Amino acid sequence: MKQTLYLISIFILTTSFNPKSWGFFGHKRINRLAVFTLPQEMLPLFKTEIEYLTEHAVDPDRRRFVVPTEGIRHYINLDKWAFLPQEKVDAQILHTDIFVVGEKRDTSLLVDFQTIRKQKRDYYLKSKSIKKIFGRDSIVVTDSSFRRFFFNNLSKIQPDEPLSISPDSLLSFFKKEKLRPLSTAENGGIKAVFAKDKLSQHGILPYHLQTIYRQLVQAFVSKNKNLILKYAAELGHYLADAHIPLHTISNYDGQYSNQNGIHAFWESRLPELFADNQYDFFVGKAGYIEQPRSYFWNIINQSNRLSANTLRIEKEVSAQFEVDKKYCPEMVNGFEVQKQCFDFAKAYHDRLGGMVEEQMRRAILAVGSVWYSAWVDAGQPDLSNLKNTPLSKEEEKEQKEADEKIKNGGKILGRTEAY
Ligand SMILES: [Zn+2]
């Protein structure tokens, strides 16, 4: 019994932290090789700290054991949206539901995706509540006041958690447009207002890349060594995720097409088998990115265009192999696990025609270019004598907690769909 328990705990220890998204191997390799694309002036920090940047390339996956809202930062299911604005606040305005609670405690929807329409620089709102509150079928709100309202009141909105805001802020937002609520003039009969986030339900990867990019620029500006390294390592992770076709669709693990396991097959098994011997990782020098926002979106759209072939080719190759020729036992940390056999993997890899190598190469160059651009945007600070700033207590606590949970076979919190 004791022996069994011991074996079980070892099993949990060795298998519970099995990050997808390029796996350990790919993420570490991408961050490491990105250092060699950088200009001379950045090397005093980046070359010296290459081990940190390599090791911490997987921190965002580790954080998923501690922070429930981490998961959605690693993917975006583009097939779930007909259209998404590139800038986060524009997307939030369209995909946040706002409810009002009336004097009789009756809750009604004020704004949601169905009742809001953008035309040129204005938003048109049309709902039953609008009619009830303002006595008009529809009202117009300018883009700039909607944005201001969002920044002032809804910037802290979290997925799956309604955020309550003051009724006054809603009224002042409409008053700017010279709209006055009906009924009791001052409070419009509104007792409470709350909002629900809808944007993050299918992942927020392109928006999170913009957030971390800004944080990295700020870290360079303040010449904070620890923060530069932290955000650089993490930006490398999310940017590498953005190069994986299956991080951009809801059928991310072939679960809707009877191809379960294709996620790890494409992004972990294939690079582990073929990267060292076959891939050419000489990708040239990092370049300056004029518009990071559209750059991130282009990467994600390009990955998305590869997703159909990623799935279709696996299906075709898979049909040519008997089940017992597809999975072969392999020893991992002293345990036998079933993995795709070499011949099966090679057939898939060959038919993909260099796709995995190309995406890895693109990821390396993108990580280097984004690090370089953030440094340029910060005014090219001298990186040779930076202050050592210890991590904040909060960050230290989070890292320790993640270590503990992973060691003790903890579970990923929040959404588990894509890594
Ligand atoms: Zn990830």
Image (cartoon, rainbow, N blue to C red):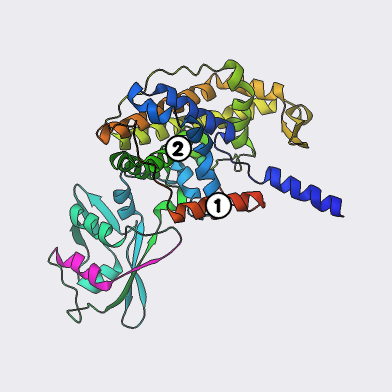
Q: In terms of depth relative to the viewer, which is nearer, 267 or 378? A: 378
Image position, residue 187 (x, y; %): 22, 78
Quadrant holding the C terminus: top right
The residue indicated by pointer 2 is 233
204 relative position to 417: left or right? left
Q: Single out the mark in the foreground, 2 or 1.
A: 1
Front residue of 139/373: it is 373
> Does residue 80 belong to the magenta stretch?
no
Q: Position of residue 336 (x, y in %)?
A: 78, 36
Residue located beneath label 1 in the image: 400
Q: Quadrant of the N terminus?
A: bottom right
Q: Amino acid at mark 1?
A: Lys
Instruction: Name the one closer to the observer, 182 or 162.
Output: 162
Name the residue located 63 percent from the left edge and 41 percent from the top edge. 18
* Residue 345 seen in render: yes
Would you say residue 250 is visible in this rendering?
A: no
**Up/down of 218 relative to 130, above or below:** above
The span picked out in magenta is 160-177
| Residue 108 position within the rendered picture, expressed as x and y whole percent measured from the top left | 35, 71
Q: Secondary structure at mark 1?
A: helix
Please provide percent x and percent y for residue 302. Answer: 42, 30
* Marks 2 and 1, the one that precedes in the sequence: 2
What kind of element bears circle 2? helix
Q: Based on the displayed image, in which of its 4 quarters is residue 227 positioned?
A: top left
**Residue type, mark 2 in image:** Ala
